[in-house]
Amino acid sequence: MAAKSGNTNFIETDVNNQRGTVRSVRGKNVVVGFTRAQACDKCGACFGKPGEGMFVEIANTLGAKPGQQVELAFGQNSVILAALTAYGLPLLALILGIAAGLALLPPSSARELIAAGIGLALCALVFIVLRLREPKRRKLPRYKLQMVRILD
């Protein structure tokens, strides 16, 4: 099975890479059909259920033709970076908000409750900022699905 490799900035042996079939060519792009992986279930970047068929239109950087099997991947570490951004930053904001509240508020019976409220408010604020910046972040090359190689 001959494989035509593409961009070396993408992980070629990652088990999270998707394999799909080129369905059609649209100018410089191709439509690739594949089955959603179980890991996709928690991502929320697209809609559907694991095991369902999905289609994505991507740049035809390798000159794939309809019917060919291709391997698709995101940029190196992009899944980890996305998870850290989506979950790590709000969690960090929550912890820092609680710590700041406990450090700055005078001792009282409601001090911990107010500190927790500050932490939750800061967490929500970070989450809202992340959601507002999501369209810009999705346009970054590391978050775009790329054709890694043609499998047949």
Image (tube, rainbow, N blue to C red):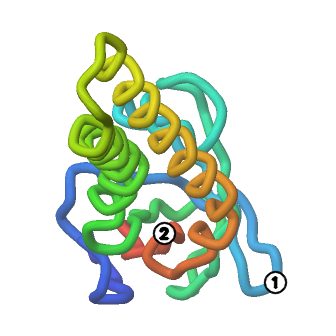
For image coordinates 63% across by 80% down, the residue present is 59
Residue bearing the label numbered 2: 143
Q: Which quadrant is the N terminus positioned in?
A: bottom left
In the displayed structure, would residue 29 be above or below residue 31?
below
Vertical comparison of 115 with 3: above or below: above
Within 10 Å of the Cα at label 2, are there few (<14), some (14-19), or many (20+) other Cα atoms? some
Of the pair 142 and 81, the residue shown nearer to us: 81
Relative side of 26 to 72, left or right = right
Q: Earlier in the sequence, mark 1 or mark 2?
A: 1
Residue 63 visible in the current orientation: yes
- Where on the picture, by quarter, is residue 66? bottom right
The image quarter in which residue 136 lies? bottom right
Q: Give the camera-side residue of 24 and 10.
A: 10
Q: Is residue 41 visible from the viewing direction of this image?
A: no
Q: How many marks?
A: 2
Q: CA distance from mark 1 to mark 2?
A: 22 Å
Q: Which residue is mark 1?
A: 27
What is the secondary structure assignment of the residue under circle 2?
A: helix
Residue 134, percent across and down? 62, 60
Query: The C terminus appears in which quarter of the rendering?
Result: bottom left
Identified by mark 1, the residue type is: Gly
Which labelled disc corresponds to residue 91?
none
Hey, what amino acid is under mark 2? Tyr
| As drawn, 39 above or below 147 | above
- Residue at screen point 22% across, 43% down: 103
Mark 1 neighbour class, 10 Å CA radius: few under 14, some 14 to 19, many 20 or more: few
Residue 69, x across and y down, in percent: 46, 60
Q: Residue at horizontal 67%, vertical 48%?
A: 55
Q: Position of residue 124 (x, y in %)?
A: 54, 39
Which of these two is toward me, 44 or 134?
134
